[in-house]
Amino acid sequence: MNLYVCLLHESTNSIPKLIQHANANNYNVVATSINANMVPLDPYETDPTYPGTLLNAVDWNSKMIFLLSDVDVDSPNPKLREHAKQILLRDVAWAEHLQNVGSMMKRLRGPKIDNLAEIVRAKTKGNWFIQVPISNPEIGSFEHRKDVTDAEIAEAEAKDPWTWWNSLRFAVKHNSKVKVVIELNDLNRPSKETVRRWLGEPIEAIIIPSSLFIRNKANYYVLQKQWQIVIGHFLSARANIIISANPNDLSISQYADYLRKLASDHNDSHILNSYENVLEIPLQPLFDNLDSYTYEVFESDPVKYKIYQNAVKAALIDRVSDIDAPNKLTVVMLLGGGRGPLARAIFNAAELTKRQVRLYIIEKNPNAIRTLSHMVDTLWEDKDVHIFSKDMRDFSPPEQADILVSELLGSFGDNELSPECLDGALKLLKTDGISIPYKSTSYINPIMSAVLHQNVSQMDTIVPAFDYGYVSLLKNVYHIDNPQALFEFSHPNREATIDNTRCKEISFTVQKDCVLHGIGGYFDTMLYKDIHLSINPLTHTPGMFSWFPMFFPTHPRTLKEGQTISVKFWRCVDADKVWYEWQVSTREVWEHHNAGGSGYHMRL
């Protein structure tokens, strides 16, 4: 769904006029009370003040967010609690009548959520937008009190509304129809870590009160720089915009225009947007032959092949002096030629350095061989290039290579079996030969992502989904702690006994109360000397998108700030396959995932 800008006004005497007025001021949705003109709140009222024919079915679904009555169905007072439940059930019944796929918004009033959760679980025809204040509303009341104490402020600040939401989320069993709407306020700007944590939640929208706007020198309403940064983080996570304002405010169109521009500035659109938070089983190019579409996606990366070219350039210059360049030949073997992008990078490097190169391209995919053969005939007819349709592990070369160049790395570094492939190709390399890349390192960190968890859960009826590792363009994610190095592989590996199994346990510290949904996986690789590529969030190569991170799911558990968690990973190998196992532990040991490679594994 495209970004929407919603005008929120809690009461109106004409829903059609409110919609018309909002549309005229650049809003495409309105949020208002489902009980327009219904006074008093009588739960047994059966004659609503407006009919279902007030709008057509499309407009009810696409232009309206219903604000449900702000009643406390978890009140400690039994009479108030029962009265509130009747009112809320009446509201939900009317909303479900008017909207078949619409949306209802309910304010979360405090930490007690059992009755609300019961109603939400029973009524899931549409979407539930749970309105949560970004900070405890009690803090705002202190502004008007002169007698407030430091102890009262500390106690209020310790009451984190995120924990209210988290209790509800578990109580409704992580239902994908229950999303969060985060309400900002002008009295308390959230910390950076608070904002980062919310990014791991299923955010539907943020509510921005008109009181956050100030006039600039041009007499135009804008946000202060600090609020631009806060709201920009949410907009980058694809949150929609709800502006809380009086429809009679003459500046409401300025609010909408300003926030649309801010959203545009934080819209990191690219050709891979459709992959955000989507779970994909990693490719197995050693076992399966890639199709042309997959090759084309990889080839569209504007950065990776330029950096490979720089690495080959540096290696050629180091191996052949300027004096020897006209006469000395460097033998380069490309392991996995695909449709030729790395071959082009190697030829470009040779031309730029004025070095003589003989290139052997070893490619096991017979379909890719057809494209490579065509390139030899039409583009490289004057090059010293030779193509072999072989598995690199079985190839017997006419001569050994000075340089092996390969692009065998997966999103977790070794998950496309680069160690096994390059170890098998060691016989192709001279004793003083080099490998590009010469080292790869995998990294992991604990992450919170409600969206990824929901996606895994939806797959669990088809495969043992919590025993798979997935490739995903991580978008709605909170990094519980920074990534740390896991497994390292170096090439060429000339050890007498080669063992590519690994096991390592790493400890992480929880920065803020959150939920662990899984483990993020990344890698970096050293191509030549200090020339490298990385998808580690801390060192990510700018502009490169050839590899998405990996996600290893766990069953969700709530973690506390300051808590230490340990993540243990295994890389296991047998005669037929390679697989990972993973396990999280705190004071107790959690589930052991993918034992024996029963789920995700890589076939040799």
Image: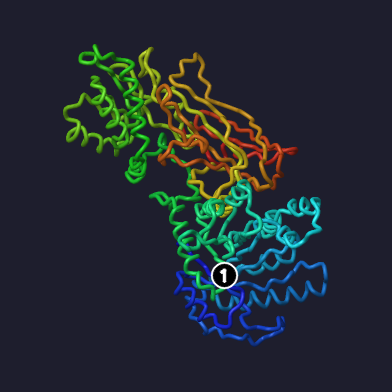
Binning the other alpha carbons within 10 Å of mark 1 as few (below 14), some (14 to 19) or many (20 upward) gives some
Q: Position of residue 10 (x, y in %)?
A: 61, 74
Is residue 175 shown to the viewer in this render?
A: yes
Quadrant in which residue 39 is drawn: bottom right
Q: From what the image shows, is residue 216 above or below residue 541?
A: below
Q: Position of residue 541 (x, y in %)?
A: 44, 36
Q: Position of residue 360 (x, y in %)?
A: 28, 25
Identity, as a three-letter code, of the amino acid under mark 1: Ala
Horizontal relation, residue 76 to residue 580: left or right: right
Instruction: Name the residue: 55% across, 53% down.
Output: 455
Quadrant in which residue 141 is drawn: bottom right
Report the front residue among 146 and 159: 146
Q: From what the image shows, is residue 599 above or below residue 101?
A: above
Q: From what the image shows, is residue 416 above or below residue 251?
A: above
Instruction: Identify the residue under disc 1.
Output: 245
Instruction: Name the residue: 62% across, 39% down.
Output: 481
Instruction: Name the residue: 78% across, 72% down.
Output: 81
Q: Secondary structure at mark 1?
A: loop
Horizontal relation, residue 404 to residue 246: left or right: left
Residue at the front extreme of this rendering: 217
Is residue 1 shown to the viewer in this render?
A: no
Report the front residue among 346 and 237: 237
Horizontal relation, residue 204 to residue 405: left or right: right
